[in-house]
Image (tube, rainbow, N blue to C red):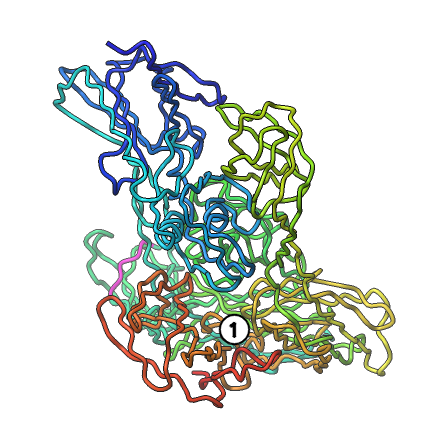
Amino acid sequence: MIPADFKVEIEDASQVWQDVTEKLRRCTDGTSSESQVIPTMTLVFAADVDAEFTILLNPQTNRGRARVRLTDGDLVTWYLLEKQSGQVAKGLRYPTVSGRAYAGVLDNWRPCSHDWPMDMAASSIAAQVAHQDITNQSGATVGVIWQATLDPTIPGGRYSVSKKRRREIINEIAEACAAAVRTSADGRSLEVYDRPSRALTESTERNYTNALSLSYEMDRVDEPANAVRVQGEVIEITRPTLPVVQVQVLPGAIDADGSDSATGRAQVFDSTGRAVQHSALVDEAISAGSYTEIPVSGCFSVQGVWLNSGTQASPVKGAKVTPTGFTASTITVPTQATQLFIVSYTQAEVVSWSSALITNEVTGEAQSTTGTLAVSTTNPIGTVRGVYRATDTNRTGTNFYTGGSATPNTTSITLGISPGAAGTAVVIDYDEYEASASVNISPSSSLCDADGFAETTIGAGTTVGMVNIMASALGQEGRTPLSLLGSAIGSLQVTADPATIRSQQPARVVDTLYTEETCEIADEGDGFKSVTVDNLISVGMVVNVGGVGQATVVRWENDTDSGVYKIIILTVGAAGTAATATYYGREVIDEEDQEATITAKVLDAAGDPVSDGTDVLFALIGRYNGAVLSADSATTSAGEASVTLTAGGVAEFQVRVIAGSYYALADISVVDHPLDSEGEAVTSDGNLTSGTSEPWSWEGLGDGEYRKGDQVCKQVPKDGDEDDGAITGRRQVVGCEGEALPYKEIEMCGTVYITDAGGWFSFSCGTTGANEVTVDGTTTTFDIAPAGSDSRWDGAIGSDLTYEVCRDDA
């Protein structure tokens, strides 16, 4: 029989408590040993409860809240509802739920990296760690009640953590104070206590029936990134090497006079990296549907044509026929008495040619998929360059358009690879449909020769500007720009002012001590009181309640959306009682993003400013790491057009500027430290396209790499020196194929480090020369250069923290 003073309640989706005691069959809660700091509970309910009650037990409802409340006499304990399972006995189903005490929610939070620059008590550091957002001291909060005798002040800068779990940090601080950590009796806070000041809470178990014949469960997943799968099938897609189409146009610039022309030349490489080859089709039986025209595909040359005196299914070679001509798609013969033929011919890959004005380029149009393989655009489509995830700003991930299709002059795209369910956010790169082309391409399709080359002729129209010439084969596309010249625009200069700017900096945090701020006691319910203060709280220190004295600080909560900042306390003071609070208040100061002005100076053939209103296009090229332009186009005034570039992270990239038939590239450096002085402006001259390749091509570059002449370069962090003589630095761990290895344990000089998402780890125990590290059981070494070398920081404020490493561009 269930005791009269025992009650179990579960919070429903509308956050109303529902008493489920009468449906309870068994309840277990508490801890089983001292090592189990966070208590757990298991509730087994009566057989075959109704559907409405089953919905109440859904662990996905109000995740992160304490949804189970156990009342046992005067003790109320709060638990998370985390797992739903069940038992079947004698054909009846008994639903079961389980979870940890609410204080265990901090084990769900991501590991944190933080340092404490100011002097702070150990108890205050532990309490700060128990906030989900340490920087802003906001989000979900678990109280840390400090009962230990020792509470030393830790000098600023002496304590920092890197990617540590929250409870691990609190345990570390407690052990340093000869104390241990346990969960409070109500399950909502952690207590730091002197060993062994209090015994463990006894694990309570009430068994009413115990007859199991079958069990099942649905596991919860704390971190989906760990690849634990709960339901459904996950299809692993291996991305193969794709065919490549390289395009040339010679000459790279022609007059837009309606009569000038250039030659387009494409070479097609298959997925093995070899130029496509001819194939021989021998004695292919064809039912022509005509007495004189035989349909074929990619016909490069004809070896022979015979009449088929048998059937299509069982061909018999009859009289030989001499063709009168052939194209890529048709072999013509004299009129015959039959439509059945046998043909031997050489088949070649077909290359399709098209064009699009660069002014019609649409890059990064944000859309949501309308199906697993469907998405639409705002403008009618000419050609689609790619469809990527919305977060893939550098286009290094999967192109979901690979193998897909789109009909020109429509807005619908059929994807070749699914990015996920309908509603997935994607970005689309495409060219708008042109009703009348700016160039004339003839033929619109051509065959590859034995070396994989196909050619066409490009005739100039009368529109001055820059046009992309595209060649498509094997489901892939290559493109190169062609300048169409006229007198309207004769030159282009681009100035980046400054060309070197500071990267986005993390917010600065300023802590101020507020002493005896006047406040008032408020009732929080469940035995807690609170005081509301004027500023965001970084450390709640002392609350004095009038007529009562100093209250015990349990935790503090910052609701930055509503601007309400409360210190939660334990006190006998009644609501409305006057009090004073002493605390550190935090102000978060965002550094202003540094910007550069990109200015295009456009002159006509006579050297005078072009007409006002002339369009100029701007685009970021390369690994720009979050940098953004204020606009992708601007119009001239007095011959000049400008946009603003706002820095992201550290990067080296270019701004591409196009005016008419000219383009220019402005080199931009984004560095990680404030500049000693205002950066210098750098001016670049415009060029006509060469026609041999995209001059701004960044294909084949790794993360953070950029082209510099005939080399590929990247910025690498310098090593530094500690006061004790040890060397600090960062290294990237890569696999056998050069791929970064994220979240790997790295052992170096007795210390274990974890690589970040990019495969980098930081060390602080290096020595000059060879240093030994162990990765996944494999031991290797890396070198640290001696002091004074380019890769060692000289310690001077403002000096470069990175150095450039280059390799020949393959």
Quadrant position of the C terminus in the picture: bottom left
Describe residue 699's horizontal placement relative to residue 590 as left or right.
left
Does residue 495 show up magenta in the picture? Answer: no
What residue is rendered at 48% in x and 23% in y?
526
In terms of depth relative to the viewer, which is nearer, 289 or 772?
772
State the quadrant of the N terminus: top left
Q: Is residue 332 visible?
A: no
Q: Is residue 430 visible?
A: yes
Residue 469 found in image quarter: bottom right
Give the SS element for disc 1: loop
Q: Percent from the top left, x then y, of residue 604? A: 82, 78
For residue 493, side relative to residue 667 (left or right)? right
- Amino acid type for the residue under numbered disc 1: Trp
Q: Residue sitting at 46 percent across and 39 percent down? A: 142
Question: As rendered, which of 155 and 330 lies closer to the eye?
Answer: 155
In the image: residue 685, left or right of residue 122: right
Q: Judge whether 33 appears above or below 801 on screen.
A: above
The residue pinned by badge 1 equals 698
Residue 694: x and y in percent read: 56, 75
Q: From this view, report whether residue 520 is shown above or below residue 55.
A: below
Residue stretch in magenta: 283-287
